[in-house]
Structures are given as structure tokens and as C-alpha cells.
């Protein structure tokens, strides 16, 4: 107890020192240290920050799990019997195209609202409080899909659960980008995609394990398993630190100092320099007249940054994920048995998991832009080949070839576009608009996903267009458009601190020159050179 009492004056003194000075020298030392710190050194010194970032991102497993469920449920016999209608042409129960679109989009509508609200709530109350309240409400919202007997009730449950998933999906990358140092930033933001893949892997495994269970419990158990997450995560996160960047943005310097003590093993001098660096970054943004409202995302240099984060996130959908990421229903319509379709789905989610882990190694060798553009290019080619195979033959070999190519697409996507997207959206936005920018980009993703969810069932459903594998042609076209945009507009942010990115965007550096552009955010904050 005596030590705790002695700590308080030290923290107050440190806060007063920083608040009473514009110590650019201290901030520059912190900036230089970030550039010089190696990956393993950063992990050793900031293992607590990495751990808390990983824990916060675990909430995204719930979103990945349920999104994985609803798409796979369309091919689930007992689910189709409860929520679908008998189709004489296929001698089976089918959830109609409109209800497939409605149920798939219900969660996305909730996620859009939740993400939009999170932009306000996180900026005002902090990431920690908002995520705790979301976990609390999530625990109650699960009852609706669990007890639903009609598609209408299930839709309401999807929307309400989506509200909390919108918070989880946008808090994870934003929190990771603020609590982790430069050397760890890319890895912990990519980890968000790993959590998504884990959720989908669990969903695919559970669905396959319950495939032979008859009656409504075969899918009710899947919903019930969601209760495993909220309470343990609530208890753990209750003891976690708030983001120092949020605290300083809200003039709580003393609390930021305390948060840093929970995030790393560095001493008082290092904490003082880190806080000076944060304050210096915010001061740069103030000099650029960077506001903190949603409208400010579309003003001045922030307009370009908003374009980058929104298009990068939308690129996940445009790359063909609605068609190839959870393709169980497509496999069935292509003529592969239900049992085999779910086996492939389980294998596919395992591929996504491995691909995301591999992305960490690629991240250390290549830039964000290289991985994103390269991944889109390869996925374009794969989708084109899938379409050609579907047009050329309806043989068993052609169908299995399409299935194999979908798994290859998934591996490439999970190694590049999928995880790298989270790193890009977390790094590109300005600090004052971080929460709102991430939420806005996620909502653009969800709107794009809603449109895709409306289109995909009509393209592939046997009661609609019934294009089967030829649906890949459509997604090839959208992926190619995303590739063209990324080549000309996506900047390289690898190895850049937030101060440097602020200056480079202010200088309107062309996207393809970002990687080699030289800038000093301290000697002359608004100038740079190639």
C-alpha cells in the first residue's frame, strides 16, 4: 500500500511536466526509438500491450462465428426445414432467395448501426467502457436467435446481435493500432483477421459435427455456444487499460500515464516521452485544422484518408468473398453432397487460419500495398479460372476443380487482402478521427456486403438465376475494379509513425511515392522530400 501511495505524486508530477511543456525533443526521441526497435525487442518490452490488444480482438471471434453460421445454415437441412419452403424441382427444402438476402443482411444492418454509434461512443466514453456494455447486451440478445421459430424473429435477433458485433469489429483494430508500438502494429491489427478466421473455423466445425443431429437442436446448439464468450471476456477486460491516445485526446494525461504502466515494462522516462509523442502528433493534426466529427472525415486531407480506408475495406467484398469465402451453398448447388460440402468448408476455414498466420511472415518482408495489390491480382485470376471451368464442363472433375480453386482463393485472400486490410485502415486514419474513420470504413464494408448478399443468392440459387460456378465471372469483374483502384490510390504506410503519416498526407504525396518519401515531422513538421 505504501508503494501505491508513493506512485501517485510521481504520476501527477510527470503529467504536470508534460502538460506544461511542448517538449518536441522528448517526442522526437520517442519517435526515433520506435523506428529503431526490432520486432522481438518490441514484443519483450510491450508484451502486456500485445496481450491486451489480443484479448480485445477476441470479441471479433463472435462476429466471425455467427456470420459463418448464417451463411452455412442455408445449406443445413434442419435449418432449411424450419425457415425455408419445399422446392419440388430440387426435392428439398430451400430458404428462398429473398430470405437468404434478408437474414444475411440483418446482421449487417445491425453492424452498420452499431459501428456508426461506436464512432461517437468510443470517442466520448473510451474503448473499454463501450466494449464492456456491448458484451453485457450481447449476452441477452442471443436469446432471440436461440428461441426463434420464424425467419422474422430470427431476423430481429440478427439485427440486435449485429449492434454489438459492429462495436467489436471496429474496436479491435482501433485499439490495437493505439496501444501497440510501430514494430507490433501490423501484426496485432492483422490478428483481428485471425480472430475472424477462428470464429469461422469454430462455426464450420460445430456445423459439421451436428450435421447428423435431427431437429431444431442441430442449429440451436450452434446459437447457444455464443454464450461461452461474453461473460469471461467481460471479467477479463474489466481489468484492462484504456488507450493512452484516447485519454490524452480527452485531457486525461495522468490516467494515460497509468495506462502506459499497464501496457509495457518501460520506465518513467520512456512513458514521459511516449506521452510527449502522442501530444506532438495531436498538435500536428490541430495545426492542420483536423476536427473530430464524422463530417471532418470528408474535409481537407482527411477526405483522401477516408477514401483509402473505405475502399480498402470494401475491397474485401469486391474481391469475391461472398462467393468464395463461405462456399458451402455454392458447393451444394454445383452438385457436391452436403456432407462433402461441409468437410470442404471446415478445411477452408482451416486454410483461412493458416493463411492469416502466414500473412505475419509476409508482413515482415513486404509492404502493405504490395500484399494488398498482389493478393487482389491473384484472386482475380482464380475467379476467372473458376468461371471458365464452370462454363466448359459440368463433369465431376470440373466441380471438384472449382472447389479446389475456391480453397486456393481463400488461402491467397487470407494471406493478403483479408488481414492486411485491418492494418491499412488502422494506420491510415488520423488520430483525432481514428474511431470514426475505422467505424466509417467498416460501415462502407457492410453496405457493400449487403449489396453483395442481395446479388449472390439471386445469381446462385436454383430457384433464381442458377448460375452456379459462372457466378465467379461477376466477382472477377468487381475484383478487377478494386485492383485498379488499389494500384493507383493505395499508399504504403509501412514503417511510418502517425506524425509522419500526418505530414505526408498533408503534403499530398502520390500513393506510389509513399514508400520512398523522406519526411521529418520534427525539424519541419509540414515539409518533406523524396
Image: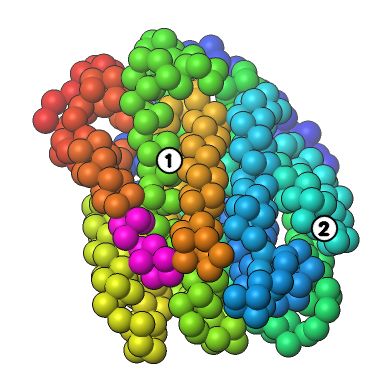
Is disc 2 placed on a helix, strand or loop? loop
Q: Which residues are magenta?
A: 467-476
Q: CA distance from mark 2 to mark 1?
A: 38 Å
Q: Nearer the viewer, residue 85 or 404?
A: 85
Residue at numbered disc 1? 425
Q: Nearer the viewer, residue 191 or 206?
A: 206
User: Which residue is drawn at the image coordinates 41% and 29% (left, top)?
Assistant: 306
Q: Is residue 475 magenta?
A: yes
User: Which residue is drawn at the image coordinates 53% and 68% (left, top)?
Assistant: 462
Q: Is residue 97 above or below residue 280?
A: below
Residue at numbered disc 2? 150
Locate the N terminus by quadrant: top right
Display colour scheme: rainbow
Q: Position of residue 391 (x, y in %)?
A: 29, 73
What is the crowding at mark 2: few (fewer than 14 residues within 10 Å), some, or many (at least 20)? few
Image quadrant of residue 216?
bottom right
User: Which residue is drawn at the image coordinates 16% and 36% (left, top)?
Assistant: 513
Q: Is residue 178 left or right of residue 157?
A: left
Q: Position of residue 232 (x, y in %)?
A: 79, 59
Count of marks, rendered view: 2
Q: Is residue 211 magenta?
A: no
Image quadrant of residue 346?
bottom right
Q: Is residue 247 left or right of residue 488?
A: right
Q: Main secondary structure of the magenta part?
A: helix
Amino acid at each position: 500500500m505504501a508503494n501505491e501511495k508513493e506512485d501517485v505524486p510521481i504520476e501527477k508530477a510527470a503529467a504536470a511536466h508534460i502538460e506544461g511543456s511542448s517538449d518536441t525533443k522528448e517526442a522526437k526521441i520517442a519517435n526515433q526509438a520506435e523506428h529503431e526497435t526490432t520486432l522481438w525487442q518490441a514484443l519483450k518490452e510491450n508484451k502486456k500491450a500485445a496481450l491486451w490488444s489480443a484479448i480485445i480482438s477476441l470479441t471479433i471471434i463472435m462476429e466471425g462465428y455467427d456470420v459463418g453460421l448464417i451463411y452455412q445454415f442455408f445449406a443445413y437441412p434442419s435449418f432449411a426445414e424450419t425457415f425455408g419452403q419445399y422446392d419440388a424441382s430440387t426435392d428439398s427444402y430451400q430458404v428462398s432467395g429473398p430470405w437468404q438476402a434478408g437474414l444475411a443482411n440483418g446482421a449487417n444492418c445491425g453492424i452498420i448501426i452499431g459501428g456508426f454509434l461506436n464512432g461517437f461512443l468510443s470517442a466520448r466514453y473510451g474503448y473499454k467502457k463501450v466494449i464492456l456494455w456491448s458484451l453485457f447486451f450481447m449476452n441477452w440478445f442471443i436469446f432471440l436467435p436461440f428461441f426463434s421459430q420464424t425467419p422474422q424473429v430470427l431476423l430481429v435477433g440478427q439485427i440486435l446481435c449485429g449492434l454489438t458485433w459492429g462495436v467489436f469489429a471496429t474496436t479491435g483494430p482501433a485499439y490495437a493500432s493505439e496501444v501497440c508500438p510501430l514494430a507490433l502494429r501490423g501484426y496485432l491489427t492483422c490478428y483481428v483477421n485471425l480472430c475472424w478466421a477462428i470464429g469461422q473455423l469454430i462455426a464450420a466445425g460445430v456445423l459439421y459435427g451436428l450435421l447428423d443431429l435431427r431437429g431444431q437442436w442441430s442449429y440451436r446448439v450452434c446459437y447457444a455456444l455464443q454464450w461461452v464468450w461474453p461473460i469471461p471476456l467481460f471479467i477479463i477486460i474489466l481489468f484492462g487499460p484504456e488507450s493512452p491516445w484516447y485519454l490524452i485526446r480527452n485531457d486525461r494525461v495522468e490516467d494515460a500515464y497509468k495506462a502506459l504502466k499497464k501496457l509495457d515494462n518501460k520506465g518513467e522516462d520512456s512513458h514521459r516521452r511516449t506521452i510527449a509523442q502522442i501530444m506532438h502528433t495531436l498538435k500536428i493534426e490541430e495545426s492542420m485544422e483536423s476536427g473530430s466529427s464524422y463530417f471532418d472525415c470528408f474535409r481537407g486531407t482527411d477526405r483522401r484518408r477516408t477514401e483509402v480506408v473505405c475502399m480498402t475495406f470494401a475491397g474485401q467484398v469486391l474481391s469475391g468473398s461472398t462467393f468464395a469465402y463461405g462456399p458451402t451453398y455454392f458447393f451444394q448447388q454445383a452438385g457436391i453432397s452436403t456432407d462433402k460440402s461441409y468437410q470442404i468448408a471446415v478445411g477452408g476455414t482451416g486454410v483461412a487460419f493458416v493463411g492469416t498466420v502466414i500473412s505475419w511472415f509476409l508482413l515482415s518482408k513486404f509492404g502493405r500495398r504490395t500484399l494488398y495489390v498482389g493478393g487482389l491480382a491473384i484472386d482475380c485470376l482464380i475467379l476467372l479460372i473458376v468461371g471458365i471451368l464452370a462454363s466448359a464442363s459440368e463433369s465431376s472433375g470440373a466441380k471438384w476443380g472449382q472447389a479446389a480453386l475456391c480453397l486456393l482463393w481463400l488461402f491467397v485472400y487470407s494471406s493478403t487482402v483479408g488481414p492486411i486490410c485491418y492494418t491499412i485502415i488502422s494506420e491510415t486514419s488520423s488520430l483525432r478521427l481514428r474511431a470514426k474513420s475505422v467505424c466509417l470504413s467498416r460501415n462502407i464494408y457492410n453496405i457493400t456486403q449487403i449489396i453483395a448478399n442481395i446479388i449472390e443468392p439471386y445469381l446462385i440459387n436454383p430457384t433464381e438465376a442458377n448460375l452456379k460456378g459462372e457466378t465467379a465471372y461477376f466477382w472477377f469483374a468487381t475484383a478487377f475494379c478494386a485492383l485498379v483502384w488499389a494500384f493507383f490510390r493505395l499508399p504504403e504506410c509501412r514503417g511510418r509513425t502517425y506524425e509522419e503519416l500526418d505530414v505526408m498526407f498533408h503534403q499530398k504525396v502520390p500513393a506510389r511515392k509513399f514508400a520512398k518519401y523522406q519526411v521529418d515531422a520534427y525539424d519541419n513538421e509540414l515539409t518533406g522530400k523524396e
